[in-house]
Image: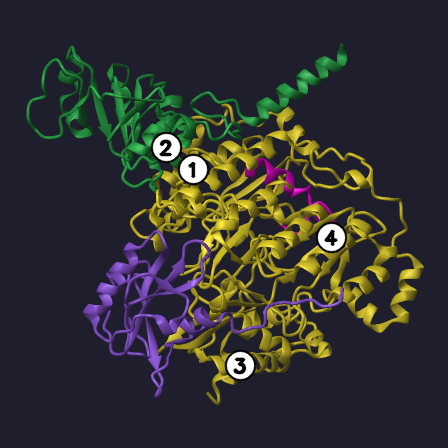
Chain colours: A yellow, B green, C purple
């Protein structure tokens, strides 16, 4: 039986962090900074070659990109305190060029970092419990969940407690720090999947079985890139007490059998595919039985201890849907539009979940300036119990806004430039940084996104098209998750020029699907036209105005879209 | 390649018998896995210590029958990025109760010392002499570990509970 | 899997992780050797007299495969100062000025093709 997280009522001013780091966590992060400082010194002096240094810096989230080093800072399960967000702003200002990029795995990236200054930047981040540990390298990466965790009306319980439990267990794990390849874990707790579970190496979905017990559905082998796969269920119901031992059994099986001869075949998705899900599950079970009741079996006291360190706001007793709110909507059309688009129901009456769009017209998807971050932190302090979330769609969330505060909040967000009412619409584009930043890219992606936001700038048009996820990746590594976009755009190189493959019908939710190719790749300057043709085709083909784009594609298949797009190409 | 044991550089008493020649008498010897399995009874009957070099792509369960008569098990890191021997080490210590010397060989670098120790290794053929010199410092880099591990390090959860228990005890006074 | 870019550059795309020396470099135009500086990650170019410069105009240029390989070899050996050295195409203008030879090199030299985010007045 699972203990529900203990809801502690604390003063608002005490609610500086959502997960209360204690001395142990702080010591670990501080020691890590000291180690990296030493490693950087040894690299700069030549004592370490790049070959020796590279895996070490990767384990701290330090990449080398086209123009500079890139620091990826972990935001565990996308949860930030205002203090932490201010520190992210400080790092952007002090060590970078005044902005940061929120990623499709709920992390933040800085694109202009100097190696020499990294230890200082990391020390600053460590002071608020943040780090780049394991945001890169062949180890377990950031634990992600859905950005509405803890406040969504439809969730069974807060998945972040489990994410934190697992995160600690896999951090600097002596056995699993040199896996065949990266390993991404996601945790979900609602029937509607907002965490893109199906595309993870390991996904854990909390649910109740027929007897009413809470446990995990365990899915393994999802992943995009060169050979995309959706995760397969290897254990329909795992008791919560067994989650750490089972995760360990999976990691050990992967560590032992994952391919190490070819980096393109090294992910666990390939192992699961080559062995078959059933055979893989058998290996895991056989290994697991050896130690499932040992030291990793969950001790209710230990779990309660972790759960108790998640603080929840001292919500006020408020009326749901206060009349003043409806009045405000009637009085201001723009506010009304924004309410209808960016505000979602909260599990506590009188509260709301507010999404901040980081997709303004002409902007870079997911970027925020230091000024914006500071302003959002201030708003979080005033209106959201000092808490902010980062979504894998590269938007931010204020998760605890009182409905009565929404008009003020909207005006403030609008002044910061994060209130474009395009959440989940065609201009809410998910994009990797692409060739403008990334040394792996074949093509640019940001400029494609920018052009699309200009083509579809008319909000009435965008609203009419409805929920439409456009995902752009500048190369086959698929950091933009294009395989699971309703419209997926993949940059490829053809004769030294930028070309793009378009796929349709991908989905990243509980009905996950990989998109299907529409036709031959098109050149850079035709991409926006193609997307316009696809949108026009959808309007023509849809059964009703409210049939979602992705459902129309499912119903009609690719062919009608292909005809229209390639008729004149 | 210096051998580090107990934090210090020590002489390696073991001779590697890697070919088919007769194993020398009266000296500690390390043999490859195939040799051990083929001549196990003879080898473990020797008066001098016997150890094995076990490849990282073979299950250590195969070694289990002889563990109590082996003085050294040497595991292999073909590159430091190949982490299979960490799993092997933990299984040998925690599942099979191996108590002899567990030696890390191959590409063994300073930045992995603490991982290696926590996985159960207690001897290290260190690639770089400079790394061997600083073993003690490098191995003490971190004082906080989240996981229970083969070297008996106390994981954070238990320490937290100990702290909480101690606090409650103090408050009760 | 091989790919011939529009600059006559034969690159083995199946192994993008291999060093420039292992790539089958077929050079049909002028090239330089470029990398990123260790300390700050800045884009640098290998000079004829050894060492690195951030100025493309000061880079050693050659259209000879053997010379290119030798330059790359020396550059790669200078692991202390720069990392990830490889052979990159350039273009020469009629006036003899050297320009980046493809979009990637243009972006490396001049920065992203987008305006970096800036906020005013909040």
Q: Are marks 2 and 3 on the same chain?
A: no
In the figure, residue A428 lies in which quadrant? bottom right
Find the distance from the CA under tag 4 to the CA under tag 1: 36 Å
Q: Nearer the viewer, mark 4 or mark 1?
A: 4
Percent position of residue A306, x then y:
65, 32
Q: Is residue A425 magenta?
A: no
**What residue would you read off at disc 1?**
A176
Q: Nearer the viewer, mark 2 or mark 4?
A: 4
Q: Give SS at disc 2.
A: helix
Percent position of residue B54, x then y:
24, 30
Residue B86 marker: 2
Q: Is residue A152 magenta?
A: yes
The chain under label 4 reads A
Residue located 37% across and 28% down the image = B135
Residue located 86% across and 56% down the image = A405
Query: Reading the chain from its start, which is encountered first: label 4 or label 3?
Result: 4
Asked if marks 1 and 2 touch (Cβ < 8 Å), the reply is yes
Q: Give SS at disc 1.
A: loop
**What residue would you read off at disc 3?**
A530
Q: From this viewpoint, is residue A1 visible?
A: no
> Residue A471 or C119: which is nearer the viewer?
C119
The chain under label 1 reads A
Residue located 55% across and 70% down the image = A446
What is the span of residues highlighted in magenta in the rendered image? A146-167
Q: Are marks 1 and 2 on the same chain?
A: no
Q: Give SS at disc 4.
A: helix
Q: Please tell me whether residue C39 is drawn above or below residue A566 in the rendered image.
A: above
Query: Reading the chain from its start, which is encountered first: label 1 or label 3?
Result: 1
**What residue would you read off at disc 4?**
A377
Mark 2 Cα shell of 10 Å, populated few (<14), some (14-19), many (≥20): many
């Amino acid at each position: 039986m699972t203990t529900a997280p203990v809801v502690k009522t604390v003063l608002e001013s005490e609610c500086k962090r959502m997960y209360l780091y204690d001395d142990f966590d702080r010591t670990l992060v501080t020691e890590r900074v000291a180690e990296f400082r030493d490693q950087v010194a040894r690299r700069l002096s030549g004592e370490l070659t790049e070959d020796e240094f590279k895996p070490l810096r990767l384990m701290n989230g330090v990449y080398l990109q086209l123009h500079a080093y890139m620091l990826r800072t972990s935001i565990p399960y996308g949860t930030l305190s205002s203090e932490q967000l201010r520190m992210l702003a400080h790092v952007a200002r002090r060590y970078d060029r005044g902005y940061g990029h929120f990623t499709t795995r709920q992390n933040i990236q800085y694109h202009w970092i100097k190696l020499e200054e990294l230890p200082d930047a990391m020390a600053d981040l460590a002071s608020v419990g943040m780090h780049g540990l394991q945001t890169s390298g062949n180890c377990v990466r950031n634990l992600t969940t859905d950005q509405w965790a803890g406040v969504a009306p439809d969730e069974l319980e807060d998945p972040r407690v489990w994410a934190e439990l697992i995160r600690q267990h896999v951090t600097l794990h002596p056995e699993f720090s040199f896996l065949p390849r990266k390993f991404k874990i996601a945790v979900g707790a609602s029937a509607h999947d907002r965490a893109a579970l199906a595309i993870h190496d390991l996904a854990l979905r909390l649910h109740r079985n027929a007897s009413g017990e809470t446990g995990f559905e365990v899915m393994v082998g999802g992943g995009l890139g060169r050979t995309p796969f959706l995760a397969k269920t290897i254990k329909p119901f795992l008791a919560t007490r067994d989650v750490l031992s089972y995760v360990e059994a999976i990691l050990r099986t992967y560590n032992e059998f994952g391919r190490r001869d070819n980096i393109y075949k090294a992910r666990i998705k390939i192992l699961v595919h080559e062995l078959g899900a059933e055979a893989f599950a058998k290996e895991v079970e056989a290994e697991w039985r050896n130690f499932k009741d040992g030291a990793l079996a969950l001790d209710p006291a230990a779990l309660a201890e972790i759960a108790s360190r998640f603080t929840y706001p001292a919500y006020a007793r408020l009326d749901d849907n206060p009349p003043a709110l409806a009045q405000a909507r009637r009085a201001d059309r723009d506010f009304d539009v924004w309410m209808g688009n960016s505000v979602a129901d909260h599990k506590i009456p009188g509260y709301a979940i507010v999404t901040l769009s980081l997709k303004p017209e002409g902007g870079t998807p997911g970027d925020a300036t230091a000024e914006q971050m500071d302003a959002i932190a201030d708003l979080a302090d005033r209106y959201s119990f000092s808490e902010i979330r980062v979504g894998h769609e590269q938007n931010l969330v204020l998760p605890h806004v009182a409905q009565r505060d929404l008009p003020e909040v909207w005006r403030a967000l609008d002044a910061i430039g994060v209130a474009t009412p395009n959440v989940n619409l065609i201009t809410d584009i998910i994009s990797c940084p692409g060739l403008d930043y990334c040394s792996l890219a074949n093509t640019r992606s940001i400029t494609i996104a920018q052009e699309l936001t200009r083509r579809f700038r008319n909000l009435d048009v965008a609203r009419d098209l409805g929920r439409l996820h456009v995902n752009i990746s500048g190369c086959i590594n698929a950091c933009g998750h294009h395989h699971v976009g309703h419209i997926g755009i993949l940059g490829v190189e053809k004769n030294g020029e930028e070309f793009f493959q378009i796929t349709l019908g991908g989905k990243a939710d509980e009905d996950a699907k990989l998109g299907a190719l529409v036709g031959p790749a098109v050149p850079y300057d035709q991409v926006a036209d193609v997307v316009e043709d696809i949108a026009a085709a959808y309007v023509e083909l849809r059964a009703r105005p409210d049939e979602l784009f992705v459902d129309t594609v499912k119903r009609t298949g690719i062919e009608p879209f292909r005809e229209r797009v390639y008729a004149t190409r | 390649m210096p051998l580090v044991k107990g934090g210090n550089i020590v002489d390696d008493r073991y001779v590697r018998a890697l070919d088919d020649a007769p194993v020398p008498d009266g000296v500690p010897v390390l043999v490859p896995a195939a040799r051990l399995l083929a001549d196990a009874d003879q080898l473990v009957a020797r008066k001098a210590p016997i150890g094995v070099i076990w490849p990282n792509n073979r299950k250590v369960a195969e070694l289990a029958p002889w563990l109590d008569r082996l003085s050294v098990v040497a595991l292999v890191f073909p590159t430091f990025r190949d982490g299979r021997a960490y799993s092997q080490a933990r299984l040998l210590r925690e599942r099979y109760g191996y108590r002899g010397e567990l030696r890390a060989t191959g590409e063994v670098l300073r930045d992995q010392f603490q991982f290696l120790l926590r996985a159960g290794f207690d001897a290290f053929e260190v690639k770089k002499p400079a790394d061997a010199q600083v073993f003690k410092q490098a191995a003490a880099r971190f004082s906080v570990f989240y996981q229970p591990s083969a070297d008996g390090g106390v994981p954070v959860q238990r320490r937290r509970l100990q702290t909480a228990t101690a606090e409650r005890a103090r408050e009760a006074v | 899997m091989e790919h011939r870019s529009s600059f006559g550059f034969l690159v083995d795309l199946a192994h993008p992780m291999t060093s420039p020396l292992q790539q089958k470099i077929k050079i049909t135009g002028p090239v330089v050797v470029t990398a990123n500086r260790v300390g700050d990650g800045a884009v640098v170019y290998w000079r004829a007299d050894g060492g690195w410069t951030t100025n493309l105009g000061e880079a050693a240029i050659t259209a000879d495969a053997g010379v290119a390989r030798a330059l790359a070899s020396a550059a790669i050996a200078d692991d202390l100062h720069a990392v990830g050295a490889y052979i990159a195409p350039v273009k020469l203008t009629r006036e003899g000025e050297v320009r980046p030879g493809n979009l990637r090199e243009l972006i490396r030299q001049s920065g992203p093709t987008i305006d970096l985010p800036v906020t005013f007045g909040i």
